[in-house]
Image (cartoon, rainbow, N blue to C red):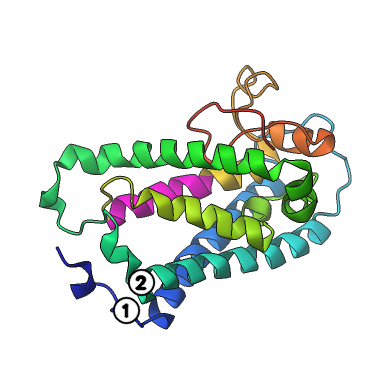
Amino acid sequence: MNLLEYFPSPGQFLAPFVFAVVIYGVRYVVMATAGFIAAKAGLGRAHAGAPAVFDAWRNVQRELAYSLVTVLAFGLINAAQFGWGWVEHSQIYLDLSAYPAWWFWFSIPVMLALHDTFFYWLHRAMHTRWLFRLTHLVHHKSVYPTAYAAYSFHPAEAFGEAFIVVAIIYMVPVHPLAFLIFQTISTAYNVYGHCGREFYPRGMATPGWDAGSTPQPRMRRTMRGGTTTTGCIPWSGTG
């Protein structure tokens, strides 16, 4: 199947850029706002050691500013994929009958697992002394993050995150709708992990398990380990 029959032809950068910015931006704003409101409403449990009085708005302003840069970075990568015709060499398929129906659904956890694995190693790299000071420190400035910190990255880290997502479509057959579901699950868990409230059962939300949102403020206070973006694999050792 010639993808360029369906997607913007090489040389067209604006349309795929705007499309990605809208998809990523709207999804982020809707999910992060829902997480922020849930936290403000007191849903879930407060983290141990969380301050009784917290100037969330100062955090939110910084998190929104960096998140805007992240969304623009995602848009630029999407524009490059289509504008330079790279997507033609990916394994994206549009005809649902091209692969068994079970693969459509199975590809979603496969993408989650691949993304968690790539993100783990990217995150380990970001915690080396030089890269941490240069890039990842931006994310750690939200010691007690709000849901809006989900996309609060240094531009270099934002491009790194975009590249590991893009890599997936060159590794396994992916239908755009399955890819959208995978990205939505990933974003939802990322927002939850930064929302400042815990919803996991108490036995799972412990430092040894490193699940849920509990590790986020702990690893920012200590600059030690934590979980990955989606949490579908219990990696630990980064933050």
Q: Tell me the quarter of the image containing the C terminus.
A: top right
**Residue reaching furthest front?**
130
Asked if the stretch drawn in magenta spans residue 177, the answer is yes
Q: Nearer the viewer, residue 55 or 19?
A: 19
Residue at 43 percent across and 67 percent down: it is 78
Circle 1 Cα neighbour tier, 10 Å, few/some/many (<14 / 14–19 / ≥20): some
Q: Tell me the quarter of the image containing the N terminus.
A: bottom left
- Residue 52 placement: quadrant: top right
Q: Which mark is residue 106?
A: none
Left or right: 96, with 196 as reference point: left
Left or right: 238, with 232 as reference point: right
Q: Main secondary structure of the magenta part?
A: helix
Residue occupied by mark 2: 82
Amino acid tagged 1? Pro
Q: Which range is magenta?
A: 176-188
Badge 2 vs badge 1, beta-carbon distance below 8 Å: yes
Q: Is residue 21 above or below residue 179?
A: below
Circle 2 Cα neighbour tier, 10 Å, few/some/many (<14 / 14–19 / ≥20): many
**Residue reaching furthest left?**
97
Q: Secondary structure at mark 2?
A: helix
Left or right: 17, with 126 as reference point: left
Residue occupied by mark 1: 10
Residue at 62 percent across and 28 percent down: it is 236
User: Who comes first in sequence, dot 2 or dot 1?
Assistant: 1
Q: Position of residue 6 (x, y in %)?
A: 21, 72
Q: Secondary structure at mark 1?
A: loop
Amino acid tagged 2? Phe
Q: Position of residue 211 (x, y in %)?
A: 60, 28
Rounded to the nearest whole Å, what is the CA distance between mark 2 and mark 1?
6 Å
Asked if the stretch drawn in magenta spans residue 18, the answer is no
Q: Position of residue 205 (x, y in %)?
A: 65, 24
